[in-house]
Image: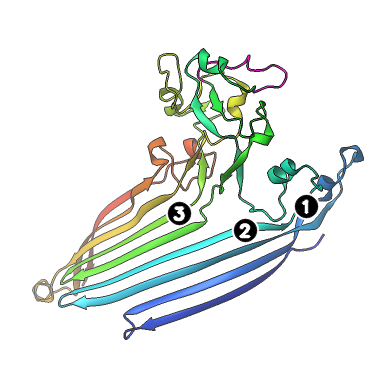
C-alpha cells in the first residue's frame, strides 16, 4: 500500500482585446488518479472467507474545463464591468476491482470500470397508488414470493421497465448525475454612475440531483406531515408515501430525487459616496452609505421543499439552513 499517484494535463489561454476592455480565459484539464486504495475481496468468491488487506487497486480520470469572459467600458459618467464564467468537471472510473460480470444486465447495473463515478440508480416511479383497483390491475408483481399483498393505496407505484412481470434490480435505471453539480457558473456586475455604485454576484450549479429526506431519527420536518399521503389527502402526486407503508417505498427511485440545479444571488452591494464638494465642507476625505446582502435570492426546484440546493444529499430536510444577511452601513474616512 502506497500513496496515490496523480498526473494532470492542463492547457489554457488568457486573452485581452480592445485595449483590455474585452478579457477572458479558457482552461481545460485531464487528471489521472492511480493507486486508489481498495479491497481485492470484491473480486473473490464469497467462499473465500476472509478480507484481504487494502491495496492500490483502482484508478479514475477526471476531465473538465473553465471559461470566463468579461467586458468593461464606460458611457459618459456611467462605467461598468460585466464578467461571466462557466466550468465543467466529471470523473470516471478507469479501473475498479470487481468481478467479471457474465450477465449483461449485471454488467450494466453494477460495473464501475469505464463508468461515471457519480451515477445514481433506482426505479422509475409513477406517483402513488390512490385506489386498490390500481394495485389489482398491475400486470407485474413487486415481490416474487408474496406478490403484491403488502401494497395499499399511498404506496409508490414503480414501473416494470423490462416487462418481465417482476419488479427487481433489473428494472433499475440510471437516474442521472449525483449530488454535486457537474456544471458551475457565475455572473459578476460592477456598475458606477457618478457617486452611486452597485456590485452583484450570481452563482449557479447545474446537472445534479438531491434525495429528499425530511426526517432523521425522531426529528421530522413539517412537510413530513403536511405533504404525506393520507386517506383524506389521496393525492397521486403526494410528496411522501403513506406512513408505515410497504417496504418497497424505501427503495431508491426517482420518486425521492429532484433536480437541484439552482441560481443564487450570492452577494449584492449598493452604495453612494458623497461628492467632493460636500466632503470638503464636512472636512472628511470620504463618506459612503451602503446596503449589502448575501444569499438574498435562490431559484431552484428544491426551494419549494425548504431545502438548500447546496446541502449534502440526503440531508436537505434537516440540514442547517443557509443564512441570509442584510446590512446597512457607513464608511467614513477623516
Asked if disc 3 and disc 1 are in contact, CB closer than 8 Å, the reply is no
Between circles 3 and 1, the one closer to the viewer is: 3
Q: Earlier in the sequence, mark 2 or mark 1?
A: 1
Separation (CA) of disc 3 from disc 2:
17 Å
327 w.r.t. 246: above or below: below
**Mark sitting on residue 91:** 2
Separation (CA) of disc 2 from disc 1:
17 Å
Mark 2, residues whose alpha carbon is within 10 Å: few (<14), some, or many (≥20)? Answer: some
Magenta segment main secondary structure:
loop
Residue at the spot 76% in from the left edge and 55% down from the top edge: 37
Separation (CA) of disc 3 from disc 1:
31 Å
Residue holding disc 1: 38
Q: Earlier in the sequence, mark 3 or mark 2?
A: 2
Residue at the spot 43% in from the left edge and 44% down from the top edge: 308
Q: Position of residue 316 (x, y in %)?
A: 49, 39
Q: Which residues are magenta?
A: 142-154
Q: Position of residue 330 (x, y in %)?
A: 22, 61
296 w.r.t. 158: above or below: below
Amino acid at each position: 500500500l502506497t500513496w496515490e499517484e496523480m498526473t494532470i494535463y492542463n492547457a489554457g489561454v488568457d486573452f485581452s482585446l480592445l485595449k483590455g476592455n474585452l478579457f477572458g480565459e479558457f482552461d481545460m484539464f485531464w487528471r489521472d488518479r492511480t493507486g486508489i486504495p481498495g479491497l481485492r475481496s470484491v473480486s473473490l468468491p464469497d467462499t473465500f472467507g476472509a478480507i484481504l488487506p487494502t491495496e492500490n487497486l483502482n484508478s479514475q480520470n477526471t476531465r473538465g474545463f473553465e471559461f470566463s469572459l468579461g467586458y468593461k467600458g464606460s458611457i459618459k459618467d456611467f462605467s461598468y464591468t460585466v464578467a461571466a464564467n462557466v466550468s465543467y468537471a466529471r470523473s470516471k472510473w478507469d479501473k475498479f476491482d470487481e468481478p467479471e460480470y457474465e450477465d449483461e444486465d449485471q454488467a450494466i447495473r453494477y460495473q464501475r470500470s469505464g463508468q461515471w463515478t457519480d451515477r445514481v440508480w433506482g426505479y422509475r416511479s409513477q406517483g402513488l397508488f390512490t385506489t386498490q383497483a390500481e394495485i389489482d390491475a398491475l400486470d407485474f408483481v413487486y415481490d416474487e414470493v408474496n406478490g403484491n399483498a403488502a401494497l395499499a393505496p399511498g404506496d409508490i407505484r414503480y414501473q416494470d421497465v423490462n416487462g418481465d412481470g417482476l419488479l427487481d434490480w433489473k428494472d433499475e435505471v440510471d437516474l442521472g448525475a449525483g449530488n454535486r453539480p457537474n456544471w458551475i457558473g457565475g455572473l459578476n456586475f460592477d456598475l458606477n454612475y457618478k457617486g452611486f455604485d452597485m456590485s452583484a454576484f450570481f452563482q449557479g450549479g447545474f446537472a445534479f440531483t438531491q434525495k429528499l429526506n425530511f426526517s432523521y431519527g425522531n426529528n421530522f420536518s413539517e412537510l413530513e406531515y403536511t405533504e404525506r399521503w393520507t386517506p383524506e389527502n389521496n393525492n397521486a402526486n403526494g410528496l411522501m408515501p403513506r406512513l408505515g407503508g410497504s417496504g418497497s417505498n424505501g427503495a431508491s427511485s426517482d420518486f425521492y430525487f429532484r433536480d437541484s440545479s439552482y441560481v443564487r444571488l450570492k452577494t449584492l452591494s449598493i452604495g453612494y459616496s458623497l461628492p467632493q464638494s460636500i466632503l470638503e465642507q464636512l472636512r472628511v476625505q470620504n463618506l459612503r452609505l451602503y446596503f449589502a446582502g448575501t444569499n438574498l435570492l435562490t431559484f431552484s426546484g428544491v426551494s419549494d421543499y425548504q431545502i438548500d440546493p447546496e446541502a449534502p444529499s440526503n440531508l436537505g430536510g434537516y440540514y442547517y439552513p443557509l443564512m441570509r444577511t442584510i446590512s446597512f452601513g457607513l464608511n467614513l474616512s477623516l
